[in-house]
Amino acid sequence: MNAAAVIANRLAAAGCKHAFGMPGGEVLALLDALRIAGIDFTLVKHENAGGYMAEGSWQATGAPGILLTTIGPGLANAVNSVANAYQEQVPLIVLTGCISHSLAARFTHQVIDQAALLAPVTKATLRVDQGIAALTVQKALSIALADPPGPVLIELPDEYLHEENWQESNTPIATPISSMGTGWDTETPEWEKANKMLRTARKPVILAGLGAVHHQAGEAIWAFAEKHQIPVITTYKAKGIIPEDHPLSLGGHGLSPLSDKSILPLLATSDCVILAGYDPIEMRDGWIDPWAAENAIEIMHAPNDHGMHNSAVRLIGNVGTAIAALAGPKGPIWTNGDPNIAKAELAEAFAMREEWGPHQIFRTLNECIPEGGIVTVDSGAHRILLSQMWRCKRPNSLLQSSAFCTMGVAMPLAIGYKKAAPNVHVAAVVGDAGFDMTTGDLATLRDLKCPMAIVVPVDESLSLIEKKQTNMQLKTHGVTFTGTDIPAVARAYGGVSTVVNDKETLRTELELAWQRSTFTVLACPVDKAAYNGSF
Ligand SMILES: Cc1ncc(C[n+]2csc(CCOP(=O)(O)OP(=O)(O)O)c2C)c(N)n1
Ligand SMILES: [Mg+2]
C-alpha cells in the first residue's frame, strides 16, 4: 500500500464514488489508486468543469465531491470552481500533486505556491506527510463537511506517490463531524426572547436560505409555516424548501430589483422575521439591513461574520429542530393581507409577456421537466428571470451558482449530477455566451454517453451586462457577438440539436430529449429586449 492508495481508500470509505478532473504525470498514481478503490473517474476538458461536476455529484449523492488536477497549470485552471465551491458551500476535496520540499528548494518548472493560490478560496490546504495520509484525508473530510461546508485542498508530494510499505502513524482519526446536531436548550434567555417575540407577532415572516437546505429543514419549516399560517420567502438556493405552488410560498428572491419591490417592503414592515439558515451571500446589495434588527430572530447553521443585517436573537445550531421548537403567534396575523398582495404583485410582474421569448421558454421547461427531474441554470439575464419564474416542488431541484454567480456552471453541474444519478432527468439552461464558454463539456457528454436537454436562449449578447451598460447610459460596447451555429457545434460533438422558435416545438423536442441516449441541445433564439424591465 502506498500513500495514494491510503487516500483513495479513505475517500471510498467516506462514500465517494465519483471523481472528476484531468491528470498530469504527477497524479497518475492517485488516479490509479482511485480506480482500484472503486471510485469512478470522469475525464473533463477543463478543470473548472471538473469542480462543478464534482458539485453535481455531491448534490446527487450527498458524498463530498472529488476534483483531481495535476500540479501547477492544472490546479490553477481549477481556481474558479474551487472559489465557487467556497462561496456556494460545497464540500469539495481537491486532490493534486506537489513536489517534495527538498526538490522545491532548487527546481522551478511548473512550481507555484499552490496552497497560497487556493488559501483564500478553501477552508483548509493540507499536505500529506510521512505516515499521515489517512489522517490528512479524514481531516479534510471533517473540515469540508463541517458547517458551512466548503472545499479543502490535499497536496500529495511526489516522493510519497509510489512509496510502497507506507507506514501510517497510529494517530487516532476523528470521524467527520456532523453538522446535524439536534439538541436545543430552550430554557435560555435567547429562546425566551425569541418565543416572546413570536407570541406577540402580528406580521411574522420566514426567510429561509442555504443553511436550511444544508440541514434539510424543509419539513420543519413547512409544518411550522402551515401551523401558524406564516408566509415563507427563500433565497434562490432554498427555492422549494416548501413547494413553491403552496399558498404560503412567496418564492425565491435576492437578485431581482423587480421582485424586491414586493418583497423588501414586506420584510421592512414585518414585526418578526424568522431567519431560517438565511445566508445573505446570495443577495444583491439591496438586501443590506432589510428589516429592523429588533424584529429578527436568526437561526443559523454557523455564526455570521458579515454586516448585511442584524437580529435581536441569534440561535446557532440545527435549523430544522430549532424551527420545530419555536412558539407561534397567539393572535391573528397579517390582517391587512399584505403577503397575498405581494404574491399577486409578483405573479403579475413575472407573468408571461410574449408568445415566444425567455418567459415562454422557462415556463414551458418548468412544465415539461419530468417528476423528480432537476434543472441547472447558468449566470446571466436568463438565470435571474428563470429563477423568479421557476416553481420548485422540492429543494435542490434548481441548481445554480447564486453566491459566486459564475458563468460556466450549468452544463458541468448537470453532467456531474447525471453521472451520479443516471436515472434522474436533467436539463441545463445556459446563455449563449455561457454555451460558448463551455462547449468542451459537450465532449464529456459524448464520452459519458449522457442524455440530457440543454436549452440555450440565443440573444447574441451578454444580456445581463448589456442591460447594466445601458442603464449606466454607456455605449453598447464589448458585450455583443455573432451567433454560433449551435446545432452544428452540438452535432460535431455527437449530440442532437435543433433551432426552436415556438412553444409547441419546444415541448415536443423536450419530450424527445428525455427519450434519447445522447444529449440534445435546443437553440432558442430570443429577442434580448424581452429582458427589459423583466426582473
Ligand atoms: C466567469 C464569469 N465571467 C463573467 C461574468 C460576468 N457575467 C455575468 S452574466 C454575464 C453574461 C452572460 O451572457 P449569456 O451567457 O449570453 O447570458 P445572458 O445574460 O445573455 O442571458 C457575464 C459576462 C461572470 N459572472 N462569470
Ligand atoms: Mg446571451
Image: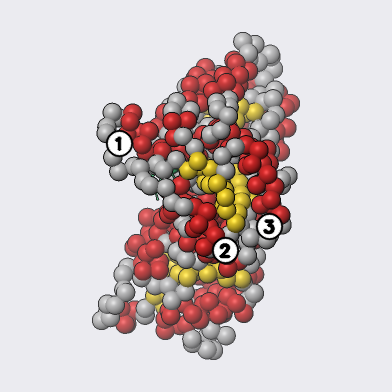
Residue 55 numbered mark, or none: none
Quadrant where the image shows the N terminus: bottom right
Horizontal and vertical percent position of residue 437: 43, 54
Q: Residue at x 52, y 54 (%)?
A: 487
Please indicate whether residue 21 sits to the left or right of residue 340 in the image. Answer: left
Distance of mark 1 from mark 3, alpha carbons? 41 Å
User: Is the residue marked 2 within 8 Å of ligand 1, measured from its CB?
Assistant: no
The CB of the residue at mark 1 lies under 8 Å from ligand 1? no
Residue 494 numbered tag: 2
The picture places residue 17, in percent across and down from the top left corner, at 63, 67
Query: Which of the two discs, 2 and 1, sits closer to the camera?
Result: 2
Q: Which residue is mark 3?
A: 516
Q: Position of residue 530 (x, y in %)?
A: 47, 30
Q: Amino acid at mark 1?
A: Thr
Residue 54 visible? The answer is no
For the residues bearing labels 1 and 3, Cβ distance under 8 angstroms: no
Instruction: Identify the element where label 2 is drawn.
Output: loop
Label 3 sits on a secondary structure element that is loop
